[in-house]
Image (spheres, helix red, strand yellow):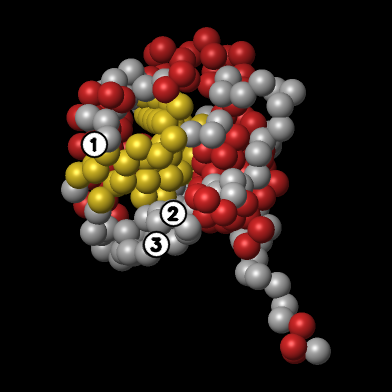
Amino acid sequence: MFISSQDSPAAFKDFTLVMPAVAVGNVGQLAVDLIVSTLNMSRVGYFHTDCLIPMAGNNPYASGKEDAEELHTPAEVYTAAELKLAVLQIRSPIIQMRSKKFRQQLKSWIKASGFSRTVVLSSSHAYQRDDQQLQGTSLRYLMTPSLLAASADALKELGWREMERIPAFPGVDADAEPRLCIPGGGITKGLYTDGCAEDLPLAVLLLFCSEGDNIPDAFALVNHLNDWLHLEEPSSKWKIPTSWSLLFGSGIPPALF
């Protein structure tokens, strides 16, 4: 695993890293799209791994014909140096049985790059919520101890709810210790538990949602992130990337009728 970039890993020192987990509804990936497009972030490198399904395509953030045909890959790094912000966009699912290896590669890069904190944007199946998870908004957060200590005041002001631990078998074993469960969340739980074990400053922001048109969920998630990190003025509008016009295909061919 390596990062092919015009910048050395040290160039990310003290940056905040935002990345999605490939999860239900692709909410994290859509939210990252909005960040990259709105902030006009620069692509500075590629995350090279054999753990993602290989694919390539045109520039998802093209502003005109001159840059529309740029080749883009499944995992790329973007930066906004003035905000000390880096984004890893992941556009391809993880190959079966390689999730652990991919998490290890991510952690190695995060440590080598010196990021001050990592924020994972994710989602979880709404239909598998526990009764207590039906309360409040659909947003939940998780933070490793090393980041929680520095963010306690901000969390109190934001009023977010921490992801609840739930019984493994509700109604069956009342004495069982509640556990963290993120159905449909991909590598989210693994990254969080790894971050706790290895003292990484890592946060998870996730929404409960369902498969379908998840654009509203993406806007909701990125707005919650903005409330914390102040990436964009609240009065500003998020810029929708040109690639979103093809989220549901290219339309029905008129020749069918």
- Which residue does the image show at 71% across and 27% down from the upper left? 236
In the image, which disc is placed on residue 56?
3
Separation (CA) of disc 2 from disc 1: 25 Å
From the viewer's perspective, is the residue at label 2 or at label 1 nearer? Answer: 2
Judged from the image, the secondary structure of the residue bearing numbered disc 2 is loop
Horizontal and vertical percent position of residue 251: 70, 72
Horizontal and vertical percent position of residue 220: 66, 38
Q: Nearer the viewer, residue 148 or 14?
A: 14
Q: Badge 1 local density, few (<14 within 10 Å), some, or many (20+)?
A: some
Separation (CA) of disc 2 from disc 3: 10 Å
In the image, which disc is placed on residue 109?
1
Horizontal and vertical percent position of residue 250: 65, 70
From the viewer's perspective, is the residue at label 2 or at label 3 nearer? Answer: 2
In the image, which disc is placed on residue 70?
2
Direction top: furthest residue: 153
Judged from the image, the secondary structure of the residue bearing numbered disc 3 is loop
Judged from the image, the secondary structure of the residue bearing numbered disc 1 is helix
- Which residue does the image show at 46% across and 18% down from the upper left? 82
Q: Is residue 107 above or below residue 167?
A: above
Please tell me which of labels 2 and 1 falls first in the chain.
2
Q: Nearer the viewer, residue 130 or 209?
A: 209
Q: In this orientation, does residue 29 appear?
A: yes
- Which residue does the image show at 40% across and 56% down from the upper left? 71
Residue 20 falls left or right of residue 248 = left
Q: Badge 3 local density, few (<14 within 10 Å), some, or many (20+)?
A: few
